[in-house]
Image (cartoon, helix red, strand yellow):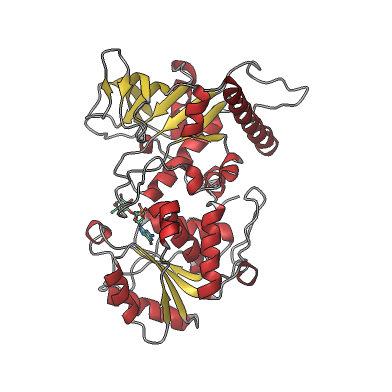
Amino acid sequence: METKEAWHLTLVVFICWLAVFVRADAEDDIAFSAGESDTTKFGQAKSVRYLLYDVNPGEGFNLRRDVYMRVTNLVKELNKEEPWVLVLPPWGRLYHWKSPDLEQIKIPWSTFFDLPSLREHVPVIEFEEYLKLRGEPVIDEVYYLQGFKGGWTKWEEKMNITECNEGTGFVQDEEGNWYSWFFGYEEVYAKKFACLSYMGHATFIKPFLLKNTIGRCVMLPRAEVLLHDHFGNSEYWKARRSMVFAKHLRDIGDEFRRENLDSTDPEDKTELEDWTKMKRNHGDALGGPYVGVHLRRRDYLYAREGNLPSLKGAAKQIKKILKKYNLQKVFVATDAPSEEFEEFKNYFKKSKVYRFVPSKEIKEKYKDGGVAIIDQWIAAHARYFVGSYESTFSFRIQEEREILGFDPDMTFNRLCPDNDSDCEKPSIWKIVY
Ligand code: GFB
């Protein structure tokens, strides 16, 4: 790589880092300050370190978004001591992303999320940016997180470098370098690899990273093992609020709302602001004149058997909601095959039922993940939302609606199974600023 380019990228990363933490300092009384009288806790010349992570290959898109939040808050904590940048693991090879003819690996985060918004929370860079900066495809140290062998009877925070419990997918060559599925980048290798048995919150690993690792880039595969430090507090919500969807996806969703659902932000009172300034009260948002439904199907029918309605049963419940709120339109976010959607639609004689069907161009550009986000965005703007039992896809829509300022009664609802019309409502996780 050109030295000039590398220097330029280093500068960009450093400025991003500085911007986030000078600002965070003002907000949160964090140890680092660029002020004149308050000298930094660490030497000016201390070079930036990088944290990269990955998640169990079996996990879906929306649980991965949750793991991101845990890791960002760890990075935020690390930055109280020394400069760390989070390297965003490229998207790809997800179990559910099966659209034919689409190459779905090495997808950068900017396809789905607004990077400047993420950077208002912690410094982040794409994996490819990291590779350019580094100049060689190397990760210095990998700690493969795993549970303690034999499970646990008493919960206590502990960690230990141990033997690996299972096949990790990492193999060592004759020169001692480690290879694995590094997001489809075959040239990437790690210099050091170990398994780390772990039970604890995300920041419990902070002293280990600061004191027991020296490499510039440390990777933590299976980062879902790290638990949220505080689920649902203001730090949780800061991380969540920073995960603003990419503008190109929001624009597509907004156009669909305008053209089909008579829904615009000024009328619906759902205008988005810079997340660091946006503060809504419950009930501020009205939402578009439609019911938003997340109708999870496919593998979920087996995984959550007994907790989902039939298509007919779902239609019956939605008709009741339409009547109660005097609405005529339904937007359905669903992974259902088209025959199932047609069947569902046919249960409605008077109301109009919509689904977002992407053009070939949208699909090629933004992939299954982008289409899923467009669905979430449209469903999040409905006057009333009803989701599927314990689906992380539904949870993320509910959070989006908390950010927009909906009344929780219009958000925390689920479709009941046919034999239990009065099923338990989902837990209410209200936004905390
Ligand atoms: O996000 P997700 O993991 O939530 O859903 P769950 C799985 C994937 O299914 C999404 C597709 O990433 C989408 O690709 N999908 C689901 C949808 N609903 C929709 C939708 O309304 N519109 C679009 N466009 N796509 C869990 C999984 O799924 O279900 C677990 O995370 C496991 O791995 C379990 O499979 C059974 O929490 O619903």
Q: Residue at x 36, y 82 (%)?
A: 348
Q: Where is residue 196 in the image (x, y as percent from the top left)?
A: 33, 25
Q: Is residue 25 above or below residue 368?
A: above
Residue at horizontal 41%, vertical 38%?
A: 227
| Left or right relative to 239: residue 284 | right
- For residue 272, above or below residue 238: below
- Residue 125: image x %, image y %? 53, 34
Identified at 29% across, 48% down, the residue is 95
Q: Is residue 170 visible?
A: yes
Residue 82, can we see it? no
Q: Which residue lies furthest to the bottom in this view?
A: 350
Where's residue 363, x and y in %? 41, 57
Between residue 179 and residue 272, name the one nearer to us.
179
Q: In the displayed orientation, state which residue is furthest to the top.
A: 175
Quadrant of the image where one finds ligand 1: bottom left
**The one of 324 and 359 positioned closer to us in this rendering:** 359
Q: Is residue 75 left or right of residue 200?
A: right
The location of residue 108, given as percent across then percent down, is 46, 42
Write down the quadrant of residue 220 in the picture. top left
